[in-house]
Image: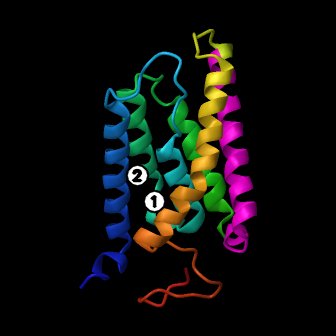
Amino acid sequence: MADLWRADPWGYRLLFLALAVFVLFARLLPVGQEPGEYPGPDLLLCLMLAWAMRRPDFIPVWLIVLATLTEDLLLLRPPGLWTALVVMATEFLRSRVALTRELNFVVEWLLASGLMVAMLLAYRTAFALTLLPQVPFSFALVQTVWSILAYPAVVGLSRLVFDLRKPATGEIDDQGRRL
């Protein structure tokens, strides 16, 4: 009975949605928001990249859009810009699922890190082109570095707590479909 939620992708989708709500709620709490403090990692981004690299069928595009657009609206960011960047990054990973299945963790971490840095640069470029005010580059870079450093913890917790792992080559599910 305990493995019932693991047998169906909808169990993981509901779990992802619950984790996204929890992370958003934690980001909205007025804790540790003193001027001059370092920003925390973007745990929702780490979660989406880790799950998209390990089991892209568990987080469809509509769920990524729902979580990220909600985050955009609640954090008062320009609606859709960060959402579009996250969707492009996760779809990039989804289209390379056969490649990422064979990667060891260090290369996977480097790939996720490269995507995070590329997303940071694209986000700041869009802000610069539209002449929107933005936080200092060092602040955004520190948040990206924290996110890169938090990625292994998110992957480890996803593996140990939620048993989210990469499928082996040729592995099939209960219905006989290739994973």
Asked if residue 55 lies left or right of residue 162, the reply is right
Quarter holding residue 136: top right
- State whether the magenta stretch is mostly helix, strand or loop: helix
The one nearer the camera, 28 or 120, is: 28
Kind of residue indicated by mark 1: Ile
The residue beneath circle 1 is 59
* Residue 143 marker: none
Residue at 33 percent across and 68 percent down: it is 10
* Disc 1/disc 2 C-alpha distance (Å): 6 Å
Q: Which residues are magenta?
A: 98-127
Where's residue 97, x and y in %?
65, 67
Tags 1 and 2 in contact by the CB under 8 Å rule? yes
Quarter holding residue 137: top right
Image height of 59 relative to 160, above or below: above
Q: Is residue 113 magenta?
A: yes
Residue at 45 percent across and 26 percent down: it is 79
* Residue 63 marker: 2
Q: Quadrant of the N terminus?
A: bottom left
Image height of 18 relative to 13, above or below: above
Asked if residue 71 lies left or right of residue 131, the reply is left
Q: Is residue 90 magenta?
A: no
Image height of 156 relative to 138, above or below: below
Asked if residue 167 lies left or right of residue 66, the reply is right
Kind of residue indicated by mark 2: Leu
Where's residue 69, x and y in %?
41, 36
The one nearer the camera, 90 or 42, is: 42
